[in-house]
Image (cartoon, rainbow, N blue to C red):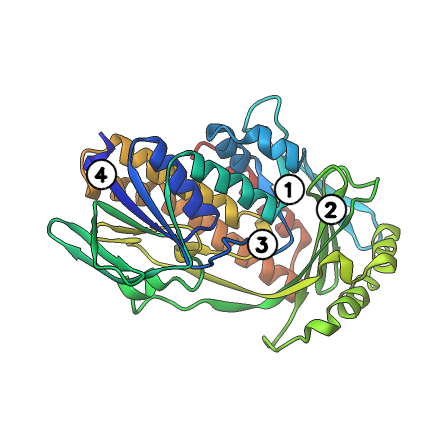
Amino acid sequence: MNAGITKALIIGGGFAGMTAAARLARQGVEVDLLEIDPGWRSYGAGISLHGSTLRVLKELGLIDRFMEEGFASDGVEMRGADDRILVTLPTPRVAGPDIAGGGGIMRPALAKILQEAVRAAGVNVHLGTTFSTIENREDGVWVAFGDGKPQRYDLAVGADGLYSSVRAKLFPEAPKPRFIGQSVWRAVLPRPAEITTVTMWMGPNLKVGLNGVSPDLAYLFLTEDKEVNDFVAPESFVETLRALLRKFPSPIIQAIADQLSEEHHVIYRPLEQMLLPRPWRAGRVALIGDAVHATTPHLAAGACIGIEDAMVLAEEVARASTVDDALAGFEARRWERCRMVVENSARLADIEIHGGSRDEHAAIMRQSMKTLAEAI
């Protein structure tokens, strides 16, 4: 049925937007995708993916491409700062018995895989542009972009991230992104032979982790408590991260600190979050991904739930008889799951900042991963 939708607009060419564009186009919808970056680049280092994300990639027919570029593994090891294993958390094989429960990949590599899928699906991609006006009318949603006149669509989807212009237009009173009192350091380096799965070391006011992103490379992340969201000079990134790693007596982490250099692409980002109360739609316009539920990386699920949003939206469009029913069904299926990720991630950050219970920390992670493994 496609809910009477024959033409749709996706605003934002990130992971959620690309997934929505590809899936809707495969359902026979004519899709325009707007991406403000003329190079359609994906910034950042590695990204950790849950089994539920691998399940979506499998449904899109992209799991083989992921396995060529990325790294898959089972379980999560939580260690003390000295390498002592505190707890091992299972990651169910939700994408199938032959696909590991989680994995990692370089962000540009995942972006390239999804870009190829978007192009192959016949999506009309418009780079270096965004919308200038968006208006719900009785006969559809009218959107102008570039220097053109408004065009009519049956559906428009705002997938334009944490600082979403679509959200600002539809919901001017929406909560603003909030700095949570932590920042994250990231780098990419040769994967230590001892690291065969996602591994995290818990230290006082710091947490460091490693996850493979290819057969040879690992993605390093370190969360640091920060009372103030102050500026950190890029020229100090390598030495600052090295000093933070030195606080962990683990021989693995010490060896990483020894080799750390500018070639390991060290980046720094303050952590912010935002959860938009329902509704996530206005008329024929819906919001997905970070535009409605930007989360911190404590559950490594931000990209996961955004990609899931896109798949669920397309599913609801395919089976509903009206646009309103499709968007209502999408929102009903997504709210509780996304709320859980944002709020549980915030609680994990709070425990780390204030020295809370490690048992509670592990229990929240275990329950969250179990929930994310359930059917969408």
For residue 297, the mark is 3
Gap between marks 4 and 2 measured at Cα:
42 Å
Q: Position of residue 19 (x, y in %)?
A: 43, 41
Amino acid type of disc 2? Ala
Question: Residue lying furthest left in this view?
Answer: 138
Gap between marks 3 and 4 measured at Cα:
35 Å
Q: Does label 3 or label 4 sit earlier along the sequence?
A: 4
Can you say whether 55 is above or below 132 in the image? above
Q: Residues within 10 Å of mark 3 (few under 14, many from 20)?
A: many
Circles 4 and 1, Cβ within 8 Å, touching? The answer is no
Depth check, mark 3 against mark 4: the one in front is 4
Amino acid type of disc 1? Gly
Can you say whether 235 is above or below 368 in the image? below
Q: Which residue is mark 2?
A: 218
Circle 2: element type: strand
Q: Which residue is mark 1?
A: 104
Circles 4 and 2, Cβ within 8 Å, touching? The answer is no
Q: Which residue is mark 4?
A: 5
Q: Residues within 10 Å of mark 4 (few under 14, many from 20)?
A: many
Gap between marks 2 and 1 measured at Cα:
8 Å
Query: Horizontally, is 206 left or right of 329 in the view?
Result: right
Circle 4: element type: loop
Between residue 100 and residue 363, name the one nearer to us: 100
Depth check, mark 3 against mark 1: the one in front is 1
Instruction: Name the residue at 73% across, 69% down.
Output: 237
Query: Horizontally, is 6 left or right of 252 in the view?
Result: left
Q: Quadrant of the C terminus?
A: top left
Gap between marks 3 and 1 measured at Cα:
13 Å
